[in-house]
Image: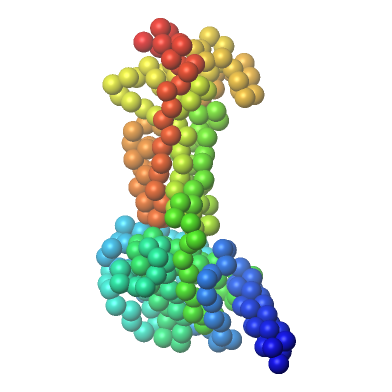
Amino acid sequence: MKKRILLMAILLSSLNVVQAQKLDIIPRPVKIEQKEKVFVVPSSVKIIVDKKIEKSSNYIASNFFKNTGINATVATGNKPDKNTISFLVDEKMNLPKEGYKLTVTKKGVIVKGKSSSGVLNGFQTLLQICSAKEVTKGTIPFVKIEDYPRFEWRGMMLDCSRQFFDKQTVENYIDWLAAHKMNVFHWHLTDDNGWRAEIKSMPDLTTKGAWRGPGEVLLPSYGSGNKRYGGFYTQEDMKEVVAYASARGISVMPEIRNSGTLARSNSSIS
């Protein structure tokens, strides 16, 4: 009898795994229930966004369109309505800070998060479901998902000191972080190989320290060759990147190092 119960438990758990993989949800949610029916998204569907995450409205609408082909209208509110897709914050939820619940029924879609970050994690799960290979475009399978991250800090670094990436590439990188429910963008801005952050009171840091090559303070390195190589982010660029990340539920952690090479070259820079 005990063996039968054990085999049944293993079978049921494996079914949950198959369902999660079928919907291509990464990482696999803590709890997921799936039914065969689907919610057919109306061509004129309305997205309701909680005022607490209003700054993410454009991001939510544009990415929903990108993944479904449906151009939704967006309204601010804190209550779901029939045939709508709602993104709501409920700080009283019995879940960790970035946890969420996603429910899809014949009435519509509700993503409810413990915080704005939780809601955005749920939004990423919804996008993954909508873009899954086995899900028909314009439909969303009936599901009940409860999920929360195991780790508070989920970050990735981009080293822009050694290899400079333009602002668009940085924003593309942030989009990939958001898609995988990361929450920290570690932005390595300064090191021996280049100073990338504009400081208006010390312009030589970027006019000289952001470039390497023949005749520059910094010698060629990392395959930059015999041409002048480099670049930097203006203060306006950095503000825009921070706002871009914030709309996606991501914090920016800049890394500012006291560069040894730049310090030794202080007489050339000052």
Is residue 2 shown to the viewer in this render? yes
The residue sitting at 52% across, 35% down in the picture is 159
Expressed as whole percent of the image width and height from the top left, the position of residue 198 reads 36, 27
Which quadrant would the C terminus be assigned to in this image?
Answer: top left
Compared with residue 18, is residue 151 higher up or lower down, i.e. above or below? Answer: above
Query: Does residue 267 lie above or below 1 as drawn?
Result: above
Q: Position of residue 65 (x, y in %)?
A: 47, 65
Residue 253 position (above or below residue 33): above
Q: Residue at x 28, y 21 (%)?
A: 201
> Which quadrant of the figure contains the N terminus?
bottom right
Closer to the camera, 172 or 183?
183
Q: Nearer the viewer, residue 32 or 216?
A: 32
Q: Residue at x 49, y 16 (%)?
A: 261
Q: Is residue 231 left or right of residue 223?
A: left
Q: Position of residue 121 (x, y in %)?
A: 45, 63
The reply, left or right, for residue 244 in relation to residue 220 is left
- Left or right: residue 75 versus residue 210 is left
Residue at 46 percent across and 87 percent down: it is 106
Can you tell which quarter of the image residue 60 is in? bottom left
Q: Nearer the viewer, residue 146 or 168?
A: 146
